[in-house]
Each structure stands twice: as C-alpha cells, then as structure tokens.
Amino acid sequence: MKRKIKILIAVVILGIAAVIACNKRLNVLDQNNPTIDSYFKTAAELRNGVNAIYSTMRSGNLVGREWFFTHDMRGGETAPGGSQLEAPRAELLKQASPSPSNSVMTSVWTGAYQMINRANLVIAKAPGVKDDPAARDVIVGEAEFLRAWAYFELVSMWGDVPIYTEPVTTITGYKGKSPAADVYTLIIKDLTDAAAKLPDAHSTDGRATMDAANALMGKVQMQKGDYAAAKAALLKVYNKYILVDNFLDNFDGDVKVKDDVKATGHEFNPESIFEVVFIDKGDADFNWGYTGEGSTAEASIMRSQEYGIVWGNVIPSDAILNEFETGDPRYKFTFYESGDSILTYRSTQPGAVLTESGMNVASSNHNGVVKKRVYRKYSVLDWNNESFHPDGLNQRVLRYAEVLLMLAECEAEVGTPAMAAGYINEVRDRKSVKMPHVTLGSHDDAIKAVMHERAVEMAGEEVNNIDILRWRAKNYYPSIRPDPKPGQVALFPIPASEISANPLIK
C-alpha cells in the first residue's frame, strides 16, 4: 500500500490548499499552500477542510462520474446503449464479477478512501480549534456524515475493508481488512454523533443536516438487517418533508450554454434531504482530472451526457421498462422514447420530436414495443441538446420518497404489512402520479409491493444494486421475485492496485 498511502498523504496536502466550489453558495478561499501543522487553527480553516471532502464526493471518481456507473451497472435497471459502452463499464454490467483491475470500480474505492482520509484530518484537528466551538462542532458532524457515507459505499459493495480513523501520515501506515460488522459499527457511531451535531434544518446549500444523517442511518441499518433500528431512525425524518407535486422537480437543475441560462430548476426542494451539488458554468467542460479541486475546477457531472442520445452509453433495461403499471405517469417522467418531444422547456414550447435516426442508442422492448429509449431523469434534453454538454443538475442522494419506501420495507419486515401499504400509498398519492392504492395482508405481499414501488419510483437513482444485495441475502430471489441479476457475485474484489501495494491485504 506504499503507493496508495503516498497518494493519500499528497491528497491531505492538496485538500488543505484546495479552493472548493462544492455548491452554488459554498466557496473556499486559497490558503497559499500551508502545511498540515500550521493550518486548521480556526473554524474557518476547518471549514475549508470539510469543503475538500465535499469536493472529493463530487469528483469524477465518485458522484461526478464513476459512482453512478458502479451502482447502475450492477443493478437491474440498465442495459448497454451499444458497442460504444466502454469496456470497464460493460464488464460491470455483463460479468458476474469484475476483474480486480476494473478501473471504474477502482475509482470509487480510491475516491471513498480519499474522502475518509480528509474526514479523518478534519476530525483529528477539530479539538485544537477554539475560536468558534459551535461552528467547529457542526463541521465535525459534516465530516462524520461524509465519512459514514464513504464507508457505507465501501462496506455495502466490498464487505470487509480496511478501517482508517486517523489521517495517514506515514508510508508504513498499512491497515488490513476489518470485518464488515466493524465497519457498520463505525458508520453507525459516526451517524449517531453527526445527527447530534448537525443542524435540524432543511439544507439549502448541499451541506449535511441532522435529517440527512438519520435518513442515511435508516438505509445503513436496513442493509445491516436491523429493521427496528432503521425504522426508529427514519421516523425521525417522517413528516418533516413533503413530496413535491411535480415528480420531475426532483431531477432538474441549472442548465446554461455560454452566458445563456436555459433553466434554474428545483434543487433543494421540499422533498430533498441531501444533494451533491453540481454547477453548469456554460462552458461544456468536465474535470477529467477527476479531482474536483480548485475554484476554477469544472463542477459538472457527466450523467446526462453518458445516458443521453448522443453518447448513448447506457439505456433502461427491458425489465425496468416493463415494471411500470399501465397508466403510471412515472413511466413518461422516467424515460424518453422516440416520438417524444424534447426542448419543450417544461411544455412551454413546441419542442422537437425525438427520432430513431437521431438517437445513438440500441433499441429496447417495452411490452412488445421495440424502439429507442433513454433515461429522462437527470437529463437536460428538455432545455438543451448539444452533442456534448456535461450538466449541472444536483444529484439527489436522499429524498423523502425513499424515506417513505424504506419505512414501508421496515414495516413489512417487522410484521405490519398494513402500515407498509400506508407508506407506499403516500408515494402513489403524489399529485402528478395518483396511482391506485395498494392493500397488503402478508409479509411476502408487502415485500413484493415494496420491490415494485422502489423500482418505479427510484429507477435510475443508484439504489437498485444495493436493494438487490439486501434482498438476495434474505433469499427473496426467487421466492418472491426472480433474481434480476442471476449469477452475480455479491461483493466486489479488492482492487488490484490495493492488493499489490498493501502487504496486509491478500
């Protein structure tokens, strides 16, 4: 792990001097390359440190690009858009297990540990900050939340992984793998502490809040198998948010071409609990260095480009298309297909019709109808159809509809299917959806209903692969539904770069 630790040490130094624009209201000033020992003396300097963690989270290694590929390729909701899908991503999608050298998987591993190391530095330096104890404690809560998120990404997809709780300062600071149970213990401790420190307020700038910590706690406890604890955490968020009337308000944002602002979107809306912030600067550029550093670094995300009609790397799978009930408005909210109109500016202009010849993607089959389709979620096509346009749509990592569906799953698991139906029906009652209510009388009926509703509500939102792992572990495939990824190996292999460098991992 010598090379990895040298990288981590360098990352710490870079993190201190980074000028971060981690969201549309949060900017970090250049500190002229101070050293670790000379820095973090004030709450403002500690704030710069936590901004560097957010910066890594939105980098190309993670949410800016490779994170959504890692999740979506391992779930059951995507298919290759054609031969243009690059080999490492195709391997994740098509193979039972990727090779240890898979670059997409390795990027997420690297990004997660970079977040962890930066969080460890902030947490370690916080006791020495005395000028503003209240601000200091909130900053530590943010660092703990972000560290917990990174470790959850690792433990849910890799299982046993190394635990680092102190910043790496030497090239011999190797750590071997710790049991997944110990990783979950650390995550739960971090989220418990974070919830006590973070503000009890709706986030309007991309920073973590108490509700974000409790919502993530619910997700973590569910994956761990403790549904009573998950329910308790999720109930702390229940009724503090609302489902926005228009389903599409959850997936739009700022769209800009040069100096022309095409859209401003509905980011930080009343349904949103935690978002990773991206900015469309109008320059059609992306930070291909993957670092996310600096005030001039591109703050865009590649999602709309990768899943769009020009690159067309990823399309919806036939399985997810056929999951939707007849008449469910969420089908049209979730997918574009040939014959639909784009550039309508939310139905205020005539727009342009998508044609089969104008979509560089493979065809898909929805209930026997074969045509070309792409994801509409996180798409900018209603405002812009440039051939290359990385976008500035915030990634909604936690939203209230998922909290309701997690509560439904908890009720199903603790033996109250009627309560599960109530939460599902709240989701189906959204003003722009209005689907018929469900009635549930048994555990299996409730779990099946949860599986369906999570699919149609959360399609393409990077949750399905984690759901599959959880339900597969409980033997719900094929007893309740067929396995959407039969033969898939549950956990990723440790990246080859880590194995070759770290003598404590074999």
Image: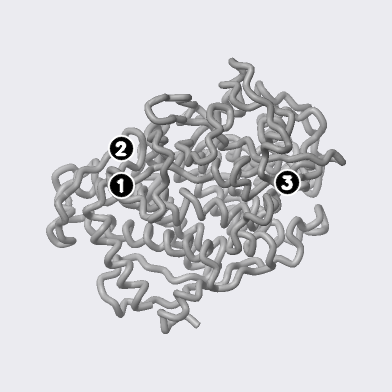
Q: Secondary structure at mark 1?
A: helix
Lower sequence index among marks 2 and 1: 2
- Observer-side mark, 3 or 1, equals 1
Tag 2 residue: 26
Residues at badges 2 and 3 in contact (C-beta under 8 Å)? no
Q: Label 1 crowding class (10 Å Cα cut-off): few <14, some 14-19, many 20+?
A: many
- Observer-side mark, 2 or 3, equals 2
Left or right: residue 305 versus residue 329 is: left
Q: Secondary structure at mark 3?
A: helix
Tell me residue 342's x, y (percent): 63, 27
Left or right: residue 329 versus residue 12 is: right
Tell me residue 471's x, y (percent): 70, 56
Tag 1 residue: 51
- Whole-number angstrom distance, CA of label 2 to CA of label 1: 8 Å
The residue positioned 21% from the left and 55% from the top of the image is 127
Q: Secondary structure at mark 2?
A: loop
Amino acid under label 3? Met
Residues at badges 2 and 1 in contact (C-beta under 8 Å)? yes
Q: Given the current orientation, which residue lies at the most extreme front position?
A: 357
Tag 3 residue: 451
Amino acid under label 2? Leu
Tell me residue 289's x, y (percent): 38, 56
- Whole-number angstrom distance, CA of label 3 to CA of label 1: 36 Å
The residue positioned 37% from the left and 72% from the top of the image is 4
- Residue 424 image-quadrant placement: top right
In the picture, the quarter occupied by the N terminus is: bottom left
Q: Nearer the viewer, residue 248 or 425?
A: 248
